[in-house]
Amino acid sequence: MSERVNNFLGGSPLGVALRLVLLSIAVGLILSWFSFSPWDVVEWFVDMFDWLWNSVFGSLDRAFHYFLLGAAIVIPLFIISRLFSMGSRR
C-alpha cells in the first residue's frame, strides 16, 4: 500500500508535502510581487469558468434557435415536395 502511495505522489508523502509548501511560498511571493491576492486568483478561475460555460452552452442555445428557425421553413417544404413526388409517381 505504501509503495502505491509513493508511486502516486512521486515520492514519500512528507517529501512531497515539503516540496509543495516551498513551491507554494515561491509562487505566492511572485504573485504578491505582481499585487495579486488569493481572491484575485479565485475570481479569475470563477470568471474563466463562467466565460467557458457561456461560450459552450450559449452557443448551443443559439444553435438550437437557428435549428428551430430553419426547421420552420425546411420541414414544411420537405413535406410538400414529398407529397408532390408521391403524386407524380402514380
Image: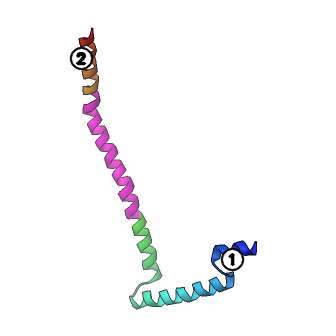
In the rendering, at what x and y percent does residue 41 appear? 44, 77
In the image, taking residue 10 as reference, residue 3 lies left or right, namely: right
- Which disc number belongs to residue 6? 1
**Kind of residue at disc 1:** Asn
Q: Main secondary structure of the magenta part?
A: helix
Residue 63 forms part of the magenta stretch: yes
Q: Position of residue 1 (x, y in %)?
A: 76, 71
Residue 47, horizontal then vertical, whole percent: 40, 68
Mark 2 surroundings within 10 Å by alpha-carbon count, few (fewer than 14), some (14 through 19), many (20 or more): few
| Residue 20 in which image quadrant | bottom right
Displayed quadrant of residue 86: top left
How is this picture coloured?
A: rainbow
Instruction: Specify the quadrant that holds the C terminus.
Output: top left
Give the vertical position of 45 relative to 21 (above or below): above
Taking the magenta stretch, the answer to whether it contains residue 7 is: no
Q: Nearer the viewer, mark 2 or mark 1?
A: 1
Q: Which residues are magenta?
A: 50-76
Report the amino acid beneath label 2.
Answer: Phe
Residue at 70% x, 74% y is: 5
Label 2, on which residue?
Answer: 84
* Residue closer to the observer: 30 or 90: 90
Q: Secondary structure at mark 1?
A: helix
- Look at the numbered disc 2 and give the secondary structure of its residue: helix
Q: Position of residue 6 (x, y in %)?
A: 69, 77
